[in-house]
Image (spheres, coloured by chain):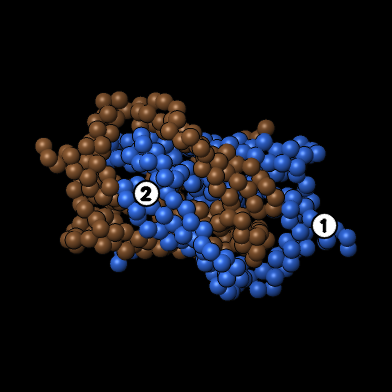
Chain colours: A brown, B blue
Amino acid sequence: METLQTTVNGFKSQDIMDTVKAIQSNPKIAKFEFRARNKWITGGHNRSTIQDFYGACVEDETRKEPFVFDNSEPPILLGNNEGANPVEFILHALAGCMTTTMMLHAAANGISVESVSSSLEGDLDVQGFLGLDDSIRNGYQNIKVSFKIEGNLTDEERNQLISFTRKSPVFDIVTNKVPIEVSVK
Amino acid sequence: METLQTTVNGFKSQDIMDTVKAIQSNPKIAKFEFRARNKWITGGHNRSTIQDFYGACVEDETRKEPFVFDNSEPPILLGNNEGANPVEFILHALAGCMTTTMMLHAAANGISVESVSSSLEGDLDVQGFLGLDDSIRNGYQNIKVSFKIEGNLTDEERNQLISFTRKSPVFDIVTNKVPIEVSVK
């Protein structure tokens, strides 16, 4: 079965099938707990570390060093650009998740893509966040995502690729409601 | 007016007041458009650049270099840990935004805080994303945020600090619905 040994969009078809079969035989391995730790530095500047997570019924130990990311703000928002700001990181996460989801589902469906890029825009009115106008929401009012996809693709495949992006976990998190429980020590 | 020259939690009180006054006199300056550009590399690996944005009625030019962030996946999710994954970036954005929002509103209310750290956990079952069980959502089922706050604070101030975090733009984005418009070239 030659097709099982192929790589599509950088994903090994066998790996995708093995993952699906493993989950079907034991759905518990599909449960993940992702984590981040954050420390305030000063003003609008803070730093997260991301390393460990739980998944496939074990604590992951593949990351020898943590990923470290700084949130900050530009001067107009009272910061010094020590990092991108949190709502910009939302666009980064959304772009990445929609892209990965598109490419994984494309691979699973045998659709080979040459290149994908995207540009995102999010509208935010800080009157909401600052409590100056209760009719304005605090977060993004809307987000526009524009993809550029290249490859030898039919119109139907192109439409499929875009429909795959709607399966993205971050697309779900942003377009739907996720409950957040806040506690303090 | 000595209080106007103070710095609370790293924010200059005068800067906060100036910002609020400027927006009250011209609400258009509160409108921001944040942006990200992303390029697929291979498999679950892609890269975002974040630099320019529109706000306060002008294109911001304070960032001389773009911020660059890689999304990737760990081996169990068919990647090679070239970066944190998109849903982990959501936790980073959420932690940072809730912290900055807390500290800015604390400063505006004259509440001085010594230190803040947080740890976040998000539960996600990949059966949703993989289309193996339609009853399971694709994104986080829930997120827990635990803050540790230190300082000479009354119980009332501590409760206020936690209530401030709910004004966070990313808290709004995650707990409520944001419309996303997807297009393709």
> Please, which chain is the residue tagged with disc 1 on?
B
In the displayed structure, B84 sits above or below B169; it is: above
Mark 1 or 2: the one toward you: 2
In the displayed structure, B56 sits above or below A171; it is: below
Q: Secondary structure at mark 2?
A: strand
Residue B114 in the image, given as x and y percentages of width and height: 75, 42
Q: Residue furthest right?
A: B1
- Look at 37% across and 61% down and name the residue there: A118
Residue B54 in the image, given as x and y percentages of width and height: 54, 69
Which residue is disc 2 drawn over? B45
Residue B136 in the image, given as x and y percentages of width and height: 35, 37
- Look at 30% across and 40% down and name the residue there: B130
Q: Secondary structure at mark 1?
A: loop
Query: 10 Å neighbourhood of mark 1: few (<14), some, or many (≥20)?
Result: some
Which residue is disc 1 drawn over? B6
Query: 10 Å neighbourhood of mark 2: few (<14), some, or many (≥20)?
Result: many
Q: Amino acid at mark 2?
A: His
How many badges with numbers are in the image? 2
> Please, which chain is the residue tagged with disc 2 on?
B
